[in-house]
Image (spheres, rainbow, N blue to C red):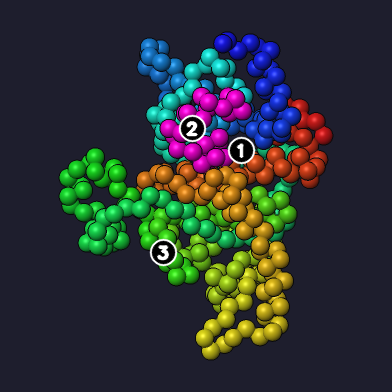
Amino acid sequence: MQTSLFDLENRYASLSEAGDPLERLNAVIDWEIFRPILARIDSKERKTAAGRKPTCRVLMFKLLILQRLHNLSDERLQYQVSDRLSFMRFLGLELSGNVPDARTVWAFREALKEHHLVEPFFEGLNQALADLGVELKSGQIIDATFVPVPIQRNGRENNAIIKADAVPIEWGKTPAKLAQKDTDARWTKKGGQNHYGYKNHINIDRDTKLIAAAVCTSACVHDSQVFDAVLRDIETGGKTVWADSAYRSDGQEQSLKDSQHESRIHERAYRNALLTKEQELSNTEKSRVRARVEHVFGHMENSMGGIFLRSIGAARAEVGVGLMNLTYNLARIEMLIRLNVFDFDKIAAPGMRVAG
């Protein structure tokens, strides 16, 4: 039985009535913001016009955002786009249109890696916000979470070699095998639990809960080692800094004082120096603000299908984590606009008028 245009419009109307979150996202984000950045992929002039032209870069970018919104594998993404009307409408695909396959999605994500485009995506989005008067400098909340990846079964000897930043000789002789081995992910233990993979270190703006800075490392890197990398200066990020006790040390406190930041990092208890009642009360008060960063990770875990990645290697993990953070920010911006926290109704590319 052939579906008529009228039937399709009715189904789209039903999706809208139910509150399609993808439709809302499309309504507030002008995806043309990212086109100039995506154009860097095609900066190399083609030698011939022969061959298949690349799929629209903005469409491919939206595919990756869709993938991160639901934490789908490349194969599952291809299936879901072919199957779900809400996904098709988000991407602007007709029922009879061609859906990019899993291999095309993988190749496009590799292009983002090769051209180092994730950071420019953040810069482009932040600039669009700044143009609308949004400055992410209400205070800085810093934290990190583990990003699991598929566990490698390498054996004790091979793991020791990998931990020493080397590669087992037999792997080096077989490129196909080496390509399937993650030599960058690491094991670590926290709270009596073992974790394997990477870490997402973020700095969020206190008022908006938007991620303003982020770094991806292997799981074994201690949170405090990345503090300076995600800390923003007081002019761009605000003076006050919140973080849990893992980030606290005498040296760090002095460094913050020297840079004119105001520390709200939790006090630490030691074996022979327990916290005083005043310190405990101070930590409780700091937690009221610091807990906002847990909301970010909670949204990723519960509303975006989880924080784990399916990729191999640090370079791909950086792309995956970066897209995860960017997708969170886009979803958060949609919510802030919907709740009238912002006094505009859309983020538009330069030259486009934005209603206020």
User: In which quadrant is the C terminus drawn?
Assistant: top right
Residue 353 quadrant: top right
Q: Is 348 rendered above or below residue 261?
A: above
Whichever of callouts 1 and 3 sits on the residue coming sooner in the sequence is: 1
Residue underneath mark 3: 194
The alpha-carbon separation of the residues under discs 3 and 2 comes to 30 Å
Residue holding disc 2: 77
Apparent side of residue 242 relative to residue 193 in the rendered image (left or right): right
Q: Dot 1: what SS?
A: helix
Amino acid bearing label 3: Asn
Note whether 280 is above or below 16 in the view shown.
below
Crowdedness near tag 3: few (<14), some (14–19) or many (≥20) residues, C-alpha within 10 Å: few
Residue 96 spot, x, y in % from top left: 53, 14
Helix, strand or loop status at disc 3: strand
Query: Foreground: 328 or 251?
Result: 328
| 267 sits to left or right of 72 | right
| Magenta stretch encompasses residue 29 | no
Expressed as whole percent of the image width and height from the top left, the position of residue 113 reads: 43, 39
Task: Name the quadrant containing residue 239.
Answer: bottom right
Q: Which residue is mark 1?
A: 124
